[in-house]
């Protein structure tokens, strides 16, 4: 009876006992069984039954990924529990997740830290398939109600991602720091956590969903802790022409020179889709589908050590644009809201040429050539320099070439375009030191090989792109130093 377990153990030792220059990663986009937010609180047995329905699906994805040679698999935020619940209704879904320093394999010793059936099952899935397994669950920590920061119910609740190694050991735990609006069932940790773990194929770090838009912990993990690959569990609502899952997440990997294993929820009704295995050298793949309501497994081989990419040199994002004279005021310039931000815009009236537009200190410069100027589509060059959205929680500088159905409706997102460009070059006078380059094609599709970023800050087409219609071309700068709600940015150069 011991032989199967012995063979698994030996296979695990052989597979992970030496350093790997490449590794096989998997991410799974999951269609979850959500709790009913209108229900009264359920029992722990009822909560566990729903979570097990989700884990059943995730386990099948893990088994398939392991059989195909994956070393690690990432599953989404809220894939198991806790979406859209209140503090009262979320409690039965939570477990006490200990610090990984306790050296614990829940599969072998499930009752060491109280009742932990979810952690036990996740641990056993990792162990039985000899794979690193990242999953998102809820953590509860008791607190003293006499402490003014302790919630009235006597607990801190955290949106949490955990990682189990191929032996089933809990090796990482991360509590989400930047909660999205409406996630009132959870608490914010006292400070951003830095959660990393080492593998035979590089150093990994973790953050969750909305965290990616902020300096700490997202940028800190890469720039100060030399992380090669990010575990990114997310439940991402897509918004165009900016902040949509696949083009922002892929651009983050490019700009930060880090692999990003991005696993998203799949829910067509809520416009949640877009997962990917992204890398700074344009390896990997992605999934974005708003028509089919089913899960999807991605598997791809990546380089393990992204910090040692040869041929990379830093970009001075304002160098090219700062040499261009600021354009004179023009009657063709107009203002319009785009994702609640009031952009300065100018229409591309000719099939080819050069145009500029400025907003505050940011001037955006575009050189372009269309294969054909269509009468049924409008393209504009837009600039925005300021705080994003009604809550104004972070500061952005954006240069965007974007397709509109008309000049009056640029604020209305569109998924499709038909105009094809032979060439484009976009640059801006950014104060941001970190800028995310994005090119999105019609149908909300990616092709990372059609563009490149030059050292002087220009985002240019690598070759003629006339075979593919452009939806948008963006340079999204994040001036983290101006964020009113972020912490510990003093070391940003």
Image: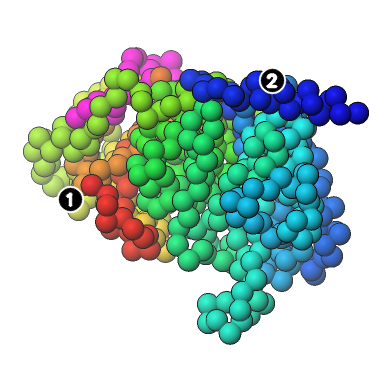
**Is residue 127 visible from the viewing direction of this image?**
yes
The answer to which quarter of the image holds residue 428 is top left
Label 2 near label 1: C-beta < 8 Å?
A: no
Magenta segment's dominant SS is loop
Viewer-side label of 1, 2: 2
Q: Is residue 308 left or right of residue 232?
A: left
343 is higher (above) or lower (below) than 416: below
Report crowding for label 1: few under 14, some 14 to 19, many 20 or more residues within 10 A (C-alpha).
some
Q: Which mark is residue 68?
A: 2
Q: Is residue 461 magenta?
A: yes
Is residue 235 among what the camera can see?
A: no
The magenta region covers 450-468
**Residue in the picture at 58% in, 46% down:** 172
Residue 153 located left or right of residue 323 = right
Sequence-first tag of 1 and 2 = 2
Horizontal side, residue 417 vs residue 465: left or right: right
The residue carrying mark 1 is 361
Quarter of the image that includes the N terminus? top right
Residue 221, image x, y percentages:
41, 44
Q: Residue at x 86, y 59 (%)?
A: 45
Q: Position of residue 142 (x, y in %)?
A: 65, 71
Q: In the shown orientation, is residue 369 left or right of residue 328? A: right
Most extreme residue toward the bottom, as rendered? 146
Residue 461: x, y in percent?
32, 21
Dividing the picture into quarters, in which one does residue 73 lie? top right
Residue that appears at 38% across and 47% down: 220
Is residue 394 found inside the magenta-colored segment of the image?
no
Label 2 Cα neighbours within 10 Å, binned few <14 / some 14-19 / many ≥20: few
Q: Nearer the viewer, residue 312 or 103?
A: 103
As measured in the structure, the alpha-carbon distance from the residue carrying label 1 to the one carrying label 2 is 51 Å
């Amino acid at each position: 009876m011991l032989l199967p377990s012995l063979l698994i153990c030996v296979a695990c030792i052989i597979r992970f006992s030496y350093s790997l220059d490449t590794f096989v990663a998997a991410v799974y986009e999951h269609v979850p069984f959500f709790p009913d937010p209108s229900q009264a609180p359920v029992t722990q047995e009822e909560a566990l039954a729903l979570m097990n329905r989700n884990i059943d699906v995730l386990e099948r994805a893990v088994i398939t990924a392991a059989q195909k040679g994956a070393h690690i698999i990432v599953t989404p935020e809220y894939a198991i529990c806790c979406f859209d619940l209140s503090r009262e209704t979320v409690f039965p879904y939570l477990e006490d997740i200990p610090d990984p320093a306790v050296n614990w394999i829940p599969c072998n010793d499930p009752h060491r830290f109280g009742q932990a059936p979810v952690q036990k099952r996740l641990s056993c899935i990792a162990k039985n398939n000899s794979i690193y397994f990242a999953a998102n669950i809820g953590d509860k920590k008791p607190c003293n109600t006499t402490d003014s920061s302790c919630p009235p119910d006597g607990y801190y609740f955290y949106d949490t991602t955990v990682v189990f190694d191929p032996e089933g050991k809990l090796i990482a735990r991360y509590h989400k720091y930047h909660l999205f609006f409406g996630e009132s069932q959870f608490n914010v940790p006292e400070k951003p956590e830095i959660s990393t773990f080492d593998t035979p194929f590089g150093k990994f770090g973790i953050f969750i969903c909305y965290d990616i838009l902020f300096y700490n912990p997202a940028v800190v993990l890469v720039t100060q802790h030399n992380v090669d690959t990010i575990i990114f569990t997310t439940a991402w609502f897509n918004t165009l022409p900016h902040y949509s899952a696949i083009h922002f997440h892929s651009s983050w990997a490019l700009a930060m020179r880090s692999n990003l294993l991005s696993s998203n929820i799949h829910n067509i009704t809520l416009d949640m889709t877009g997962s990917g295995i992204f890398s700074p050298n344009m390896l990997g793949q992605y999934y974005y589908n708003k028509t089919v309501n089913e899960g999807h497994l991605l598997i791809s081989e990546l380089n393990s050590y992204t910090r040692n990419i040869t041929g990379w040199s830093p970009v001075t994002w304002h160098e090219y644009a700062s040499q261009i004279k600021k354009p004179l005021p023009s009657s063709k310039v107009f203002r319009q809201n785009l994702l609640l931000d009031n952009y300065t815009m100018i229409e591309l009236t000719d099939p080819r040429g050069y145009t500029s537009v400025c907003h505050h200190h940011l001037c955006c410069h575009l050189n372009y050539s269309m294969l054909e100027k269509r009468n049924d589509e409008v393209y504009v060059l837009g600039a925005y320099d300021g705080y994003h959205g009604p809550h104004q929680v972070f500061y952005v500088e954006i240069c965007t070439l974007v397709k509109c159905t008309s000049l009056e409706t640029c604020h209305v997102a569109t998924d499709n375009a038909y105009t094809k460009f032979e060439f484009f070059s976009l640059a801006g006078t950014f104060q941001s030191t970190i800028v995310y380059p994005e090119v999105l094609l019609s149908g909300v599709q990616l092709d990372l090989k059609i563009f490149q970023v030059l050292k002087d800050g220009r985002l240019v087409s690598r070759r003629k792109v006339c075979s593919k219609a452009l939806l948008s071309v963006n340079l999204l700068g994040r001036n983290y130093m101006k964020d009113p709600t972020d912490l510990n940015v003093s070391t940003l150069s």
